[in-house]
Image (cartoon, coloured by chain):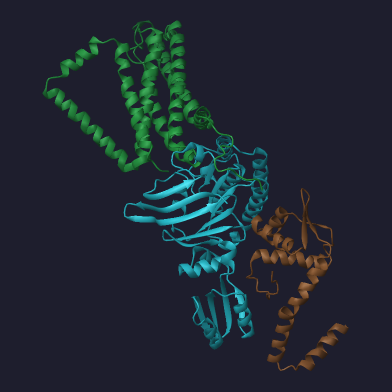
Amino acid sequence: MTALAMDAPGVARGLKERLWDVVRLHATNPWTTLILPWLITFAIFGLNYAIWALVSRAAGSGLEPDAFANNGGVSWILVYMMVTAVQAMSATFRFALGMSVTRRDYYLGTVLYFAMLSVLYAAGLTVLGWVEQLTDGWGLGGYFFAPVGLDSQPLWLRAYAILVLLLMFFFVGATFAAVWMRWKVNGLLTTFFAIAVVLVGLAWWATDAGLWGVVGDFFTEHSIVVLLAWTLPFTAAAALTGFGLLRRATP
Amino acid sequence: MNLEVAVDDGRPIFVQIAEQIEGQIVDGTMPEESQVPSINELAAFHRINPATALKGVNVLVEDGVLYKRRGIGMFVAPGAREVAVARRREGFRAKYVRPLVAEASHLSITPEQLSEMIRKEAGQ
Amino acid sequence: MTAVIEVEHLTKTFGKVEAVRDVSFSFAEGGIHGLLGRNGAGKTTLMKLMTGQEFLTSGTVKVFGQSPVENASVLGRVCFINESQVYPENFRGKHALKAASQFFVNWDEEFARELIADFGPPLGRPIKKMSRGQRSAIGVIIGLASRAELTFFDEPYAGLDAVARHMFYDHLLADFSRNPRTVVLSTHLIDEASNLLDRVVVIDAGEILIDADAEQLRVEAVTLVGKASAVREFAAGREVLGIQQLAGMASVTVTGLDDDDRQAAREAGLEVGPVSLQQLIVSRTGGRTSATKEGAAS
């Protein structure tokens, strides 16, 4: 029998390889994160298109030019991604622990995966939005791939918006997932309740101190680019919170 | 190494392994200078831990019944059969004769009757 | 012999419950070791503590000389096959094996294919739709093919029939000989596995009950059967693990007899019989294990 040295690393794995293994884990069954969102997007788009076609046909020439302009139906994908994040993490976390992955490597790899997904979807949706623009709303003036309020904005801004918002929703979802894994159902409910309390408290305070004017000014004074950039620290905070919670989670 | 303990199957496995190999040497299944199965083969065959198989084989190596040829394996040593037979003869009395005599006395069979039985049995 | 696992004064409490209480033992490198005990005794918790999946309350755990918690260099050399492993929602058998092949550095694909052919799990079926035996087969294949330096098998054959179980032992031994590693096996089917084990640690209600070499335990106790009076006389002054009497006969399980004692017992007309590891543990834990209940039922 050959001797096994106590500290022989064998084929030691670097951080990059370990994180990439986690990314591959998430992608092993691509249905939930890579296929279904596109399918649903196209399904809803198809539905919208059918409705536009029907209405156009029915209204004939009496249709207003911007009848379908403010659709922005693609925004649903943000919420879907939050749910996807929760699903992806709760499913793979315990399995990853079983595959001898540390919580830190798991979280970093998952962060990487979510970031990659965000880029992928932002790019894809922007391209579709570009085609939409080129075809003047698919020939029917229907604007599905422009997020609400952004249909008049340049493409780069839309890409940036989708990316930043997707990141935020992913990481908020990841944080909720971490709460669930650490404290299970009770923890999750308590967290929702606490968030509700805080929000209501803030709203009450804002009303009481007449701060709504300030809030309104904040939104109108700053450009969309800056407003969206404000989500980034929030996303980062969510990411850090998620990690902090996951560190002590057990399978 | 005292192998003359009577069979009760509660004996250490390595003892049983050593005894089994020795038995095969005695009855000629494993002639001198023939190769003995490897530790891994023994472990797999008996479904035991390889360390246990190794222990059993080492007992026989220590007693000079087996020897190791580096890089090749374990072989039955020259003169091993005589050693094994001699040892078995020593244990024969405790293992077979004593229980035989004890049982015979329970049944009130005299030593003379017993000897007669043995002779008849051997004659067949 | 270097110790690949060293546990000292380990305690784990869940709220008010002490799942593991002041446990200390070590396992040597390169052996097949048993972590035995009744259901709920603390085996799984102990394994989770040794693989960094659970956080200890007090004491120390050292695997390859370091704490395993969040330690990628240690965990990368470890594989833990949990009886109740959770798989991602839509995973099929083949996904689990593919993932495992990526995570475990020493994975042997050829060996995995051999095992798949032998155990025959339905690779295309979603894991949540598999029978318990099929899930166990997946786990066993991952554990064996991982060739991890330290592999834990926690009740690996729930749902596997006797044929499959013996295939597991055979493959384990065969591979163990060719590719040395350290294996820690927990099971309630003690006798089946007892011949494979080097060191045996028995845990009962969170505490260590037995910590000894399997060989030593095999000969530790004997059963003496014969005339009640003779039996009692012989058992006097010895540690008695159990005694039964019927008509004029008695059967007693005692420890601490050496070869001469056994011979003397035989000459006194008593039958000297072996005590299997399972029986020994049952006597020591003072009750019927789930295995004996199963054994009686099957």
**To which quarter of the image does residue C199 belong?**
bottom right
**To which quarter of the image does residue B49 belong?**
bottom right
In the figure, is residue C136 to the left or right of B48?
Answer: left
In the figure, is residue C114 to the left or right of C8?
Answer: right
Picture coordinates of residue C99, whole percent (x, y):
55, 36
Above or below A84: residue B24? below
Picture coordinates of residue B79, whole percent (x, y):
83, 65
Q: Which chain is cyan?
A: C
Task: Tell me which residue sits at (20%, 17%) in the image.
Answer: A215
Above or below A171: residue B69? below
Picture coordinates of residue C227, whole percent (x, y):
57, 87
Picture coordinates of residue B97, whole percent (x, y):
74, 83
Task: Tell me which residue sits at (79%, 93%) in the image.
Answer: B113
**Can residue C249 be seen from the camera position used here?**
yes
In this rendered view, identify the residue nearer to me: C220 or A240. Answer: C220
Q: How many marks?
A: 0
Which colour is chain A painted?
Answer: green
Q: Which quadrant, please, contains the C terminus of chain C?
A: bottom right
Q: Which residue lies furthest to the right in this view?
A: B123
**Can residue A43 be seen from the camera position used here?**
no
In the figure, is residue C12 to the left or right of C108?
Answer: left
Which colour is chain B painted?
Answer: brown
In this rendered view, identify the residue nearer to me: A40 or C113. Answer: C113
In this rendered view, identify the residue nearer to me: A209 or A13. Answer: A13
Task: Tell me which residue sits at (77%, 63%) in the image.
Answer: B65
Task: Tell me which residue sits at (40%, 23%) in the image.
Answer: A77
